[in-house]
Structure formats: structure tokens, C-alpha cells
Image: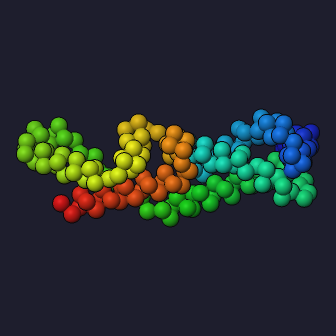
Amino acid sequence: MMDVERIKRINKLIEGISKGDQNAIMELYNEMAPSIRFIALKYIKNEFDADDLVQDFWADIYKIASKFHYVKNGFSYLCKVMTRMALNKYKKDKRVRTIEIEYVDYELLSTNSENQGNEEKIIVENALKQLNNEEKIILQLSFFEYKSVRQIGKELNMSKSKVNLIKNNALEKLKKIIDNK
């Protein structure tokens, strides 16, 4: 069972946030961050996406706190908010169709048949040439520099959803081009 004093402290911080106290956000963050991240990881199971969700949670804390009229247990309430956010993201991710690209080991292909490996390389190179610069950059950052959608968005000054949309459209475009060869 949670310490009554801690619940009171969290409730007071939430009340302070709803009144515009910015220091209360940092204090609430220090108090609740491990629990909030634990909940996100429990449902999302991917550190990058879980961290994105946690950042969204803390960015929206003003909106969340402004809706509080009376909360008996702020800790429990915020945990429930994060749980709902995580479940919604999990459900959304399950609905989104993923595109899988098979890895082609060109070295192995070239030992079996030099011409076949070159043909495959040419097809992929030609497909990549048909992408615009924005698509090429996002795929490069994602697959070769292993950056998260959040990191790419920050670097290119785009929202996470825009980066995701461009990335998925580029992958779909590549798949169609390669399948038609």
C-alpha cells in the first residue's frame, strides 16, 4: 500500500500544476517518473516507443491536470492515465500494417551468381533513386543510423507522425517498385 503522505504530496503537486505552478511539474516528475515509465514499458515493450509515450505524457500534463476537479489519489489517477495512453498506443500499433523488407546478403549472392547479385543491386539502386530526398534521408537515419522516429523528427524539425508517415510511404513505394521488376 502506498504511503499516505506520498499521496498527499502528489495530490498537492497536481493541484499546483492545475494552477500553473511549473516547479510542481518537476517535483511531480521526480516523484512519479519511474512508475510512469514502468507502465509504458509494460505495454509497449519497446524502449524508444515507450520513451516517446512517456514524453507525450509529461508534455500533456498541463492538459491532464487542468481536468482534475477532485482526485483522492493522484498517483493512482496518473498511473491510470498512462495505462490508457499505453493501451491506446498498443492498439493503434496493432492496427497499423507493417511492411517487412527482407535483408539481401549481396556478398552471398555474388558468390553464387555474379550476375544475379548485380541485377538485384541494380533493382534496389533504381528503386532508391525513385524516392525523393526527404524519403531517402528518413530511411537512411532510420535503418542505417538506427535513430528513432522521435530522434529523426527532432533532427528534421518534423512531428513523429509526419516522420512515420513518410517512412511508411517510402517503404511501400520501394516494395511496389521492387515487386514490379
Tell me the quarter of the picture where residue 178 sits: bottom left
Q: Where is residue 158 shown, x and y percent of the image?
A: 54, 48
Quadrant occupied by the C terminus? bottom left
Specify the quadrant that holds the N terminus.
top right
- Identified at 21% across, 63% down, the residue is 180
Q: Position of residue 53 (x, y in %)?
A: 63, 48
Percent across and percent down for residue 34 are 71, 38
Q: Residue at x 57, y 62 (%)?
A: 91
Inspect this view and state whether residue 44 appears: yes
Above or below 153: residue 181: below
In the depicted view, which residue is nearer to us: 177 or 55?
177
- Please say whether residue 3 is visible from this viewpoint: no
Foreground residue among 31 and 2: 31
Viewer-nearest residue: 5 or 54: 54
Residue 17 at x, y percent in the picture: 85, 46
Kindly indicate the quadrant of the structure image that contains residue 166.
bottom left
In this rendering, position of residue 126 left or right of residue 154: left
Placement of 129 over or under 110, stated as above or below = below
Residue 16 left/right relative to 147: right
Q: Is residue 30 above or below residue 40?
A: above
Q: Residue at x 76, y 38 (%)?
A: 29
- The residue at 54%/44% (across/down) is 157
| Location of residue 115 with respect to 86 vertically, above or below | above
